Image (cartoon, rainbow, N blue to C red):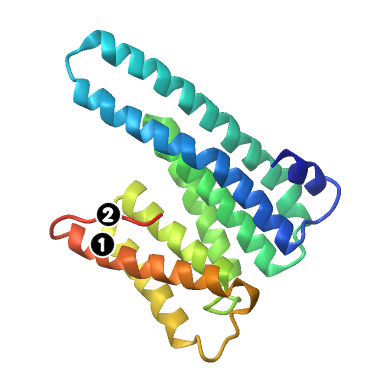
């Protein structure tokens, strides 16, 4: 991620370089998000066992500190280099989606005013991304990823399941309905995977609102 970040300060990233940056970033963030979630569950399970809870809280604080640093590095890079150098609608939508994702990751564990700030900033970034992405084909990988991540944000962070389902259903229906009319290109497999994740989330969220389910994010 650091090598791509350095390159981003010197010139606009190509589509492949953007993907590499995103993969590198997610590769660093995802394990820490998973670790933090597991530690939080353990903390709740231990209940009144104060000594164990103290150890878990300390480790969770370390993980959250690492997440803070990674997210802030990416947000700074996006605001100071990536977005200003973006010359295409797709690139702008891509970076704004990453910006929304970074604030979403922070909102997962922040509390009180800090959480609300992260929520507001994530919503603003996703909304700006949608204003760009609406000019892309419904089968655009960037547009579909935005719909997937924004709907996950609405479901898990904003706690608006009906809105999340509507967003996912709309993106899924538009993509499936135009697959024959729009070339998916080199992103075919990745695009079809996102379409499947949207479908899975629609199913799981519908079940969860009436029972149990899991979310693809």
Image position, residue 35 (x, y; %): 41, 32
**Does the image show residue 88?**
yes
Q: Which mark is residue 30?
A: none
Eyeballing the image, is 49 above or below 148?
above
Q: Along the line of sight, which residue is nearer the eye, 145 or 31?
A: 31
- Of the numbered discs 2 and 1, the one sitting upstream in the chain is 1
Decide if residue 73 is on the left or right side of residue 66: right
Q: Residue at position x 33%, y 33% from top? A: 38
Q: Residue at x 35, y 70 (%)?
A: 199
User: Looking at the rendering, which quadrant does residue 107 occupy?
Assistant: top left
Q: Estimate the spatial distance between the alpha carbons at disc 2 and disc 1, rounded to whole Å.
A: 6 Å
Q: Is residue 62 above or below residue 165?
A: above
Q: From the image, tell me which residue sits under label 1.
A: 204
User: The N terminus lies in which quarter of the figure?
Assistant: top right
- Tell which of 180 and 121 is nearer to you: 180
Which residue is situated farthest in the left direction here? 211
Along the line of sight, the residue nearer the viewer: 153 or 118: 153
Please tell me whether residue 98 is drawn above or below residue 72 in the rendered image.
below
> 60 or 147, which lies in front?
60
On screen, residue 82 versus residue 189, left or right, reads right
- Secondary structure state at the residue bearing disc 2: loop
Of the 4 image quadrants, the one containing the C terminus is bottom left
Q: Is residue 106 visible?
A: no
Task: Provide the residue designation for mark 2.
Answer: 214
Relative image position of residue 141 (x, y in whole percent): 56, 69
Q: Are marks 2 and 1 in contact (CB under 8 Å)?
A: yes
Q: Position of residue 103 (x, y in %)?
A: 51, 43
**Residue 213, position in %: x, y?**
22, 56
Q: In the structure shown, which secondary structural element does the residue marked by tag 1 occupy? A: helix
């Amino acid at each position: 991620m650091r090598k791509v970040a350095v390159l981003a300060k010197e010139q606009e990233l190509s589509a492949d370089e953007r993907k590499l940056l995103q993969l590198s970033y997610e590769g660093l963030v995802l394990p820490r998000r998973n670790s933090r979630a597991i530690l939080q569950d353990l903390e709740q399970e231990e209940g009144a066992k104060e000594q164990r809870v103290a150890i878990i809280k300390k480790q969770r604080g370390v993980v959250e500190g690492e997440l803070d640093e990674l997210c802030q590095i990416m947000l700074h890079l996006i605001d100071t280099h990536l977005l200003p150098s973006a010359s295409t609608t797709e690139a702008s939508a891509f970076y704004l989606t990453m910006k929304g994702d970074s604030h979403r990751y922070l909102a997962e564990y922040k509390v009180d005013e800090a959480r609300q700030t992260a929520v507001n900033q994530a919503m603003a970034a996703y909304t700006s991304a949608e204003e760009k992405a609406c000019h892309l084909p419904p089968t655009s990988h960037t547009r579909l990823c935005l719909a997937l991540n924004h709907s996950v944000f609405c479901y898990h962070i904003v706690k608006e399941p009906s809105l999340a389902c509507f967003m996912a259903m709309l993106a899924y229906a538009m993509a499936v309905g135009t697959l024959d009319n729009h070339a998916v290109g080199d992103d075919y497999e990745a695009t079809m995977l996102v379409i499947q994740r949207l479908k899975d989330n629609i199913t799981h969220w519908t079940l969860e609102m009436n029972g149990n389910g899991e979310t693809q994010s």
